[in-house]
Image (cartoon, rainbow, N blue to C red):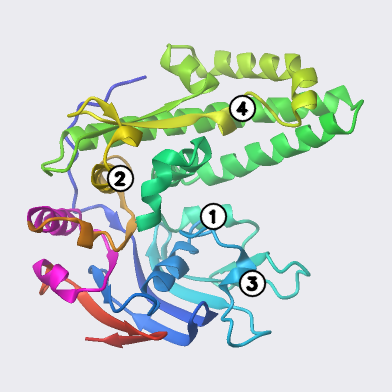
Amino acid sequence: MHTLLETPDVSLDNKILSISSLSLHHFRNYISARIEVTSAPVVLTGRNGAGKTNILEALSLLVPGRGLRRAKISELDNRLHAGASWVLAAGISGMQGESKIGTGRDVEAGDADKRIIKIDEKVARSQAELARHLAMLWLTPQMEQLFHEGASSGRKFLDRLVYSFDGSHASRVNEYEFAMRERNKLLANGPSDPHWLDALEQTMAETGSAIAVARLVACEHINVAIQNSPLSFPIAHIEIHGFIEDKLNEGEAAVAVEEMVKKTLHAGRGQDAMAGRTLTGTHRSEMKVFNIEKQMLAENCSTGEQKALLLSIVLAQARSGAKWQGVVPVLLLDEVVAHLDATKRLELFEEIDQIKAQVWMTGTDSTLFEGLQGKAQYFQVENGKVITT
């Protein structure tokens, strides 16, 4: 892979992505709420259970995926108003300029776990269209389990990082997974049309190789940004390993790797049919994070170190996205500040100020955010109500 040696530098020409307004209706513990903000950092404070994280979850549904809690669509309805489906709307300043995004449970679909998405009043064909407008990263207390939950969680985390570098990544991932599911069905149902299997495997080879390249490039950008970071956080190094990624790292050309994948899938049809799943591909790749200073895998580090490593990666992605793509994503940091000492809190606030990202932060103690006085917007959250402070 090509090595990038430039020092990341945030340019004034970068597109700073931001949310300007958010309206919630029958979402979680909110019956109806609206918040209007500028592109400056946003601080939400309040007791546990007041609804701070629910706001961040609503924002996380403005990009592809199932949000920061990965909840089912039907689980997002306000439980006190049975029969009322949730809906949210947001004004954004995104990659395509000013836009309005609306999403909610699709009550006409006949499926309680299907949602509808509208962008500037037009129904989106798929969630992947959201990636053309907005890039967003988040960090929550639950994500400290990322290093112990298996390869799937790591891949999803890394793919979220990739979206900010490559808006087409979500579409490729969806196309790859659809082709894989169709192939699995054909293999499970016995004798199949070999030409249709060939076509599906060709799609998996092409999209899988593109997915792997995008992941490797993102890792490279992020690692360079971490190495050049002034922060005193643990120095993380992120890698992705798998059949395709390893071949590319060994210097194989992408076209040659595509052909290898296609031949491997063809030869493995019998084995995959017996296993009931596809045994080779980017859906089985594994993300690894190292603590460089300790020469240790993140999964073997302390809980505090793991949190710091994740925060280091998220901040580096924001900085590297600004450097190489000219886009600064929206950041959602849920209860992150409480785990940092005073020095690291100030470093975090200074980094946010330098990157110029719109960061939404939550916490129970407003004093933890004193370092942002004059630079942030403050809101108190109480029982499903948002109050300007």
**Residue 347 falls within the magenta-colored stretch:** yes
Q: Quadrant of residue 49?
A: bottom left
Q: Amino acid at mark 3?
A: Arg
Where 318 falls versus 49 (above or below)? above
Circle 4 or circle 1, nearest the eye? 1
Disc marking residue 310: 2
Q: Residue furthest left?
A: 343
Circle 4 or circle 2, nearest the eye? 2
Q: Alpha-carbon neighbours of circle 3 within 10 Å: few (<14), some, or many (≥20)?
A: many
Q: Quadrant of residue 19?
A: bottom left
Sequence-first tag of 3 and 4? 3
Q: Amino acid at mark 2?
A: Leu
Q: Amino acid at mark 1?
A: Gly
Sequence-first tag of 2 and 1? 1
* Residue 136 seen by the camera: no
Q: Label 3, label 4: how many angstroms apart (C-alpha)?
A: 33 Å
Q: Please tell me which residue is depicted at 20% across the width and 35% down the height of the picture.
A: 235
> Disc 4 vs disc 2: Cβ atoms closer than 8 Å?
no
Q: Which residues are drawn in magenta?
A: 343-371
Sequence-first tag of 4 and 2? 4
Q: Which residue is mark 4?
A: 206
Circle 2 or circle 3, nearest the eye? 2
Q: Label 4, label 2: how many angstroms apart (C-alpha)?
A: 31 Å
Helix, strand or loop at mark 3? strand
> Disc 2 vs disc 1: Cβ atoms closer than 8 Å?
no
Q: Which residue is mark 1?
A: 65
Q: Label 4, label 1: how many angstroms apart (C-alpha)?
A: 22 Å
Sequence-first tag of 2 and 3? 3
**Viewer-side residue, 220 vs 118:** 220
Q: Label 2, label 1: how many angstroms apart (C-alpha)?
A: 20 Å
Q: Amino acid at mark 4?
A: Glu
